[in-house]
Image (cartoon, rainbow, N blue to C red):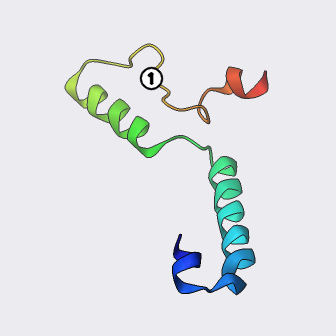
Amino acid sequence: MVLELTTAYALVLPMLTACLTACLVAQWLGGRPIYGQMLERALAQAGRGPVKGSDIGLAADRDRATH
């Protein structure tokens, strides 16, 4: 939408490259969602322990990613 409003179509390739790089780096670093980590930390501090299936998101689900 921003590209259409600004007519800066020359930025499409650099923007796609930046998005792809960011996704690959996030996956390489572990790919766990920040809100899932924050939930686990808050539950641990509250003394509730880990919740079954506490890895939130597809990137954190190793079994699902390999099948």
**Residue 20, image x and y in percent?**
71, 61
Residue sticking out furthest to the right: 67
Residue at (53, 69) in percent of width and height: 1
Q: Residues within 10 Å of mark 1 (few under 14, many from 20)?
A: few
Question: Which quadrant of the figure has residue 58?
Answer: top right
Seen from the viewer's position, the closer of residues 4 and 40 is 4
> Is residue 64 placed above or below 17 in the rendered structure?
above
**Residue 39, image x and y in percent?**
33, 33
Question: How many callouts does the rendering have?
Answer: 1
- Label 1's element? loop
Seen from the viewer's position, the closer of residues 11 and 19 is 11
On-image quarter of the C terminus: top right
Residue at (48, 29) in percent of width and height: 56
Inspect the image, locate mark 1, and give the three-letter code of the amino acid beneath it: Ser
> Is residue 22 placed above or below 65 in the rendered structure?
below
Query: Mark 1 — residue?
Result: 54
> Is residue 43 placed above or below 48 in the rendered structure?
below
Question: Which quadrant of the figure has residue 62?
Answer: top right
Residue sticking out furthest to the left: 46
Residue at (62, 44) in percent of width and height: 30
Residue at (44, 13) in percent of width and height: 52
**Residue 18, image x and y in percent?**
67, 70
Is residue 51 rendered to the left or right of residue 29?
left
